[in-house]
């Protein structure tokens, strides 16, 4: 866990109200499909106004935005989708679900949606996808709000390395063992206890004869070379960039946020106190506030 520094100007946390027991927020609908490079991708849109695209990370889905995007829908037409091989998008044996395909999928969706310079909100692998699409595919953004992103080496836990070495064994694990491992893994992303409903939402795509092997497939295909590929290219983008980071992120330390902000933004990282890697669950209001500040500056 990253030590807290008194010099940080943190987004303050509201008073604790005890462990979360129920999440009554409505799920986001994904009624649309797009076929990109042979993959069926599910997506949705809410709101009105200039476009904003939200890109989730691993091992989550677009449902991480269910408490955030509705708060932006009166100012933006918000597009959201499930990454290739994630959530409600197609999952199949032998599928490429690595970072190498995700930026190409994003470029395909931009073309499908006829977007040129939307605002972009990105987390974790979504951050890597947004950056790869900028540097490798020529996508351009009106603004980028990026947080707790997979962007700078080193990354990848011992668990990831173990799955890469033994993917078939994990994919064939008995259901009760897989469920226990999955729930424990998801909880490590958050600083606060996840509600039972949140655990069910994030577990559901990874269960059953299709979901379980898909979960270990996406872990086995995690490869640092896809971020190393763009590392020499990282520099200031020609749009406003805000970098946020949970101060209690046990997956990617806060110092990586400091480093990333120094490379791609003209502003320092914005610490989010009392939040781990999954800021969408720990401090959703901090993300809403950051996006609103970002778009109000323009």
Image (cartoon, rainbow, N blue to C red):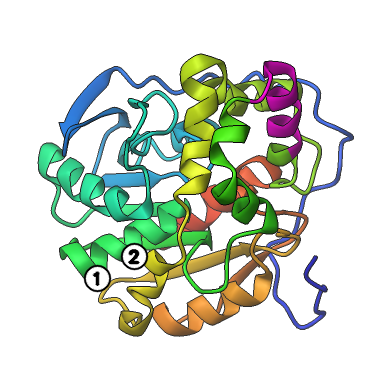
Residue receiving disc 1:
135
Residue 177 belongs to magenta span: yes
Please say if the residues under marks 1 and 2 sit with CB atoms less than 8 Å apart. Answer: yes
Residue 296 visible somewhere in the drawing: no
Residues drawn in magenta: 173-184
Q: What residue sits 34% from the left and 65% below the top?
A: 131
Is residue 249 rendered to the left or right of residue 103?
right
Q: Position of residue 88 (x, y in %)?
A: 40, 23
Which quarter of the rendering shows the N terminus? bottom right
Q: Is residue 157 above or below residue 27?
A: below
Quarter-of-image position of residue 31: top left
Q: Nearer the viewer, residue 198 or 287?
A: 198
Mark 1 lies on a secondary structure that is helix
Quarter-of-image position of residue 249: bottom right
Q: Position of residue 24 (x, y in %)?
A: 65, 18
Q: Position of residue 250 (x, y in %)?
A: 73, 59
| Mark 2 Cα shell of 10 Å, populated few (<14), some (14-19), many (≥20) | many
Is residue 137 rendered to the left or right of residue 248?
left
Q: Nearer the viewer, residue 176 or 293?
A: 176
Q: Position of residue 204 (x, y in %)?
A: 57, 20
Residue receiving disc 2:
131
Q: Nearer the viewer, residue 123 or 284?
A: 123
Q: What residue sits 37% from the left and 26% below the top?
A: 91
Marks 1/2: CA–CA distance: 6 Å
Q: Nearer the viewer, residue 279 or 137?
A: 137
Q: What residue sits 68% from the left and 62% below the top?
A: 11
């Amino acid at each position: 866990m990253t030590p807290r520094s008194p010099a940080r100007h943190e987004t303050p946390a509201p008073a604790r109200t005890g462990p979360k027991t129920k999440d009554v927020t409505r799920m986001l609908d994904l009624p649309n499909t797009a076929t990109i490079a042979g993959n069926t991708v599910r997506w949705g849109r809410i709101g009105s106004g200039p476009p904003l695209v939200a890109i989730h990370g691993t091992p989550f889905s677009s449902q991480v935005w269910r408490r955030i995007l509705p708060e932006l829908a009166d100012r933006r037409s918000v597009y959201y989708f499930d990454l290739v091989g994630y959530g409600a998008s197609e999952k199949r044996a032998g599928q490429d679900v690595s970072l190498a395909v995700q930026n190409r999928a994003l470029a395909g969706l931009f073309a499908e949606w006829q977007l040129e310079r939307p605002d972009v909100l990105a987390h974790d692998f979504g951050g890597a996808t947004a950056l790869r699409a900028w540097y490798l595919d020529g996508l351009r953004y009106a603004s980028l709000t990026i947080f707790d992103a997979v962007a700078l080496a080193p990354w990848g836990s011992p668990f990831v390395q173990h799955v890469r070495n033994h993917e078939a064994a994990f994919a064939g694990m008995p259901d009760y063992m897989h469920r226990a491992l999955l729930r424990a893994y998801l909880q490590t992303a958050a600083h606060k206890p996840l509600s039972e409903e949140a655990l069910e939402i994030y577990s559901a795509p990874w269960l059953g004869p299709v979901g379980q092997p898909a979960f270990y497939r996406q872990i086995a295909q995690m490869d640092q070379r896809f971020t190393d590929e763009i590392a020499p290219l990282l520099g200031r983008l020609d749009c406003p960039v805000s970098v946020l980071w949970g101060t209690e992120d046990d997956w990617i330390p806060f110092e990586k946020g400091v480093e990333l902000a120094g490379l791609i933004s003209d502003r320092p990282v914005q610490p989010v106190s009392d939040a781990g890697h999954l800021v969408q669950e720990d401090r959703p209001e901090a993300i809403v506030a950051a996006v609103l500040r970002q778009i109000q500056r323009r």
